[in-house]
Image (cartoon, grey):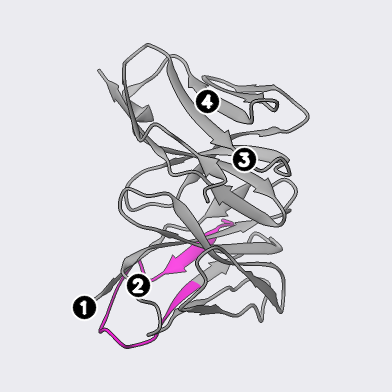
Amino acid sequence: DQQVKQNSPSLSVQEGRISILNCDYTNSMFDYFLWYKKYPAEGPTFLISISSIKDKNEDGRFTVFLNKSAKHLSLHIVPSQPGDSAVYFCAASGADMLTFGGGTRLMVKP
Amino acid sequence: DGGITQSPKYLFRKEGQNVTLSCEQNLNHDAMYWYRQDPGQGLRLIYYSQIVNDFQKGDIAEGYSVSREKKESFPLTVTSAQKNPTAFYLCASSRDRVLGEAFFGQGTRLTVV
C-alpha cells in the first residue's frame, strides 16, 4: 500500500507558466515533507521542504504548500523554465524512514 | 568537498552471483539509506541505518543484506536470492531523521545477465 502517491506520472507546461505538481499521503504520522528533482541516471537532489507545522514554504521560484487536513502537498514552480524539466519526487519523513512517491515527469516546453 | 559517493556507476554480474555496492559519505551523517529505482517507478526503500552497527529492513529487503560497521560506510549486497536484481540503486544519507533531508549519491546501475 503506497503511503505517498503522485497521481500524475507526467506534466507538460509552457515556458514562463506555472507548474503545479501534486502529492498525497495517507500516514498522519509523517511530520516533514520534501521535494526532490531527479535527472536520468543521477541521484535526486533536494529542492525544498516543509514541516508539518507550516502550510507554506517559499524559496525563489519554488513554493511548497501543505494541506494537513487533506493530506495533500503541492509544489509550485513559477515561472517554469526548460531547465526545470526532470522527474520530481515528493517524500515524507516519519518513523525513521523517508518514503517517496512514484514521481512526476515535468516537461517545460520553450 | 563533503558528499556521498557510490561506486561503481555501472556494474554487470552473472545471474546467481552476489554483488556488493559501495556507499561512502563524509558528511558526518548518522542515517544512511538504500533505495532501488526501476524504470518509470519511484524510489523504494531497501534498508536503512540510523546508527553504527544497527540497521532496519525497508519495504523490499528480501534478497539484500547490509552492514554498518563504520559511520561513513553502508555497503549493500545483492544476493542470488534477489529475483529481479537489475535496477538503479541509490544510496542516501541524512543528518537527522526528524528533519529528513537526505543527500543522494549518483547511483549504481546494476545489470544481471
Q: Secondary structure at mark 1?
A: loop
Say whether disc 3 or disc 4 marks the residue closer to the N-terminus. Answer: 3
Residue A79: % across, % down: 43, 14
Residue on which the image places disc 1: B113
What's the residue type where badge 2 is placed?
A: Pro
Q: Relative to residue B51, is residue B106 depicted above or below?
A: above
Q: Tell me which chain the residue with mark 2 is part of.
A: B
Quadrant of residue A105 within the rendered picture: top left
In the image, the segment drawn in magenta is B1-22
Residue on which the image places disc 3: A26
Q: Secondary structure at mark 2?
A: loop
Q: Nearer the viewer, mark 3 or mark 4?
A: 3
Say whether disc 1 or disc 2 marks the residue closer to the N-terminus. Answer: 2
Residue B85: image tag: 2
* Quadrant housing the N terminus of chain B: bottom right
For the residues bearing labels 4 and 1, Cβ distance under 8 angstroms: no
Q: Give the distance between the C-alpha atoms of the residues marked 3 and 4, in whole angstroms.
A: 18 Å
Q: Give the distance between the C-alpha atoms of the residues marked 1 and 2, in whole angstroms.
A: 10 Å
